[in-house]
Amino acid sequence: MAVVKLTKANFKQTIESNDFVIVDFWAPWCEPCVAFTPTFEAAAAANTDIVFGMVNTETDPEIGEYFQVNQIPGVLVIREQAGIHAQVGEIGAPAFDEIIKWARDYDMTTVREYYRNEAAQEAVKKTAKH
């Protein structure tokens, strides 16, 4: 799968409609960021069930600010709309492959329980208002 260019216009929809997204925060002036791009693209080609997206922090700084990305390159792994891992700094292909493997195997039970509890509390609040 090709790497998706993530912007303010498509970021939220991409996260909400895909269970597994890996985001690369980068900028064109950042040499380590540019050097990581082929590694990121190769991982996207090898893991077609995952959405790989790149956020240019120069053109869409709000996304980076929302996720408190203070340093690039930065990678954020999102499963089921929850950020489960953040990696800052240079990373090689073997280490990136290990992060992807770890993220695939990550037990989402606690995250799902959290979302269920949040939904239940919202339902109680709505019922109480009526």
Image (spheres, grey):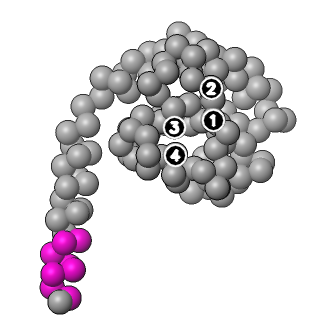
Q: Secondary structure at mark 2?
A: loop
Question: Residue 76's mark?
Answer: 3
The answer to whether marks 4 and 2 mark residues whose Cβ atoms lie closer than 8 Å is: no
The answer to whether marks 4 and 1 mark residues whose Cβ atoms lie closer than 8 Å is: yes
Up-down: is 17 above or below 73? below
Predominant SS along the magenta part: helix
Please identify the quarter of the rendering in which residue 101 is found. Answer: top left
Up-down: is 130 above or below 103? below
Please identify the quarter of the rendering in which residue 110 is found. Answer: top left
The disc, 4 or 3, on the residue closer to the chain's N-terminal end is: 4
Q: Is 126 colored magenta in this rendering? A: yes
Q: Determine the residue located farthest toward the top in the rendered image.
A: 94
Q: In whole angstroms, how far apart are the C-alphas of marks 4 and 2?
A: 14 Å
Up-down: is 102 above or below 71? above
Three-letter code, disc 1: Val
Disc 2 marks which residue?
2
The answer to whether marks 1 and 2 mark residues whose Cβ atoms lie closer than 8 Å is: yes
Lateral position of residue 109 relative to residue 5, left or right: left
Lateral position of residue 89 relative to residue 86, left or right: right
The disc, 4 or 2, on the residue closer to the chain's N-terminal end is: 2
The answer to whether marks 1 and 3 mark residues whose Cβ atoms lie closer than 8 Å is: no
Q: Secondary structure at mark 1?
A: strand
The disc, 4 or 1, on the residue closer to the chain's N-terminal end is: 1
The disc, 3 or 2, on the residue closer to the chain's N-terminal end is: 2
Q: Depth check: 71 or 65 in front? A: 65
Three-letter code, disc 4: Thr
The residue segment tinted magenta is 122-129
Question: Residue 14's mark?
Answer: 4
Q: Residue at x 23, y 53 (%)?
A: 114
